[in-house]
Amino acid sequence: MYARLGVMGAYVVWTLAFILLGGFVLGSLVEGRWRLPKFYLLWGLAFFAYAAGWVSAYFFLRGAAGEWLGSLIGSVLMTTVFCLAFNVARSIPKLSLLLFIANSAGYFLGSLLNDSIGGRPGMLLWGLLYGLLLGTGIATLLHLLQKPRKRTVGAALRGRPWF
């Protein structure tokens, strides 16, 4: 894709593919007001924020530092969009950490797999592992955002959500 579309073109295609395919799969996990097709709006906004954060950091720093910063910024931005939509802004730091771990594990473990296998099989395995772990992180995030808000007495007194 890099050869035909360039770096920016490849990122645009991957972003659209993630939004279209990911929205369909992840939207089936959402109940209530954000159920499909409304979920596509939320998902598109969340993933666009993620992609913009990732790409900006990567183009600013390049290399591994840009990838790590992109993973962090992208994870925080996506989590922020979801938490604000589900009215749990106080959970942004904890849930951002969850998504950052899943995102980074998928990306960097996939990269190691790609480097050790190489060629198209390596790239496909990278994409598979990255998508699987990032998708699991997002699915977990959506699950936690929709869980009934059982609160302990201490948490209720501090005005905090349960997670």
Image (cartoon, helix red, strand yellow):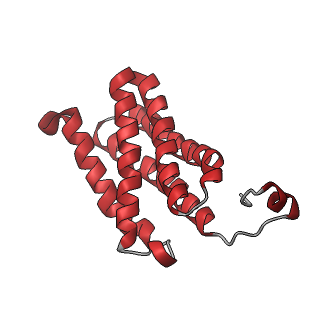
What residue is drawn where x is 47% and y is 75%? 33
Question: Does 148 sit left or right of 41 as displayed?
Answer: right
Question: Furthest residue to the bottom?
Answer: 32
Query: Residue 112 location in percent, x, y?
Result: 46, 34
What residue is drawn where x is 40% and y is 62%? 42
User: Which of these two is toward me, 64 or 113?
Assistant: 64
Query: Residue 70 location in percent, x, y?
Result: 44, 34
Query: Residue 108 location in percent, x, y?
Result: 48, 36
Q: Is residue 45 above or below residue 113?
A: below
Question: Does 92 sit left or right of 69 as displayed?
Answer: right
**Can residue 67 be seen from the camera position used here?**
yes
What residue is drawn where x is 65% and y is 47%? 94
The quarter in which the C terminus is drawn is bottom right
Question: Does 125 sit left or right of 81 as displayed?
Answer: left
**Can residue 108 be seen from the camera position used here?**
no
Figure quadrant of residue 18: bottom left
User: Which of these two is toward me, 134 or 52?
Assistant: 52
The quarter in which the N terminus is drawn is top left
What residue is drawn where x is 32% and y is 26%? 59
Q: Is residue 41 above or below residue 45?
A: below
User: Which of these two is toward me, 108 or 87?
Assistant: 87
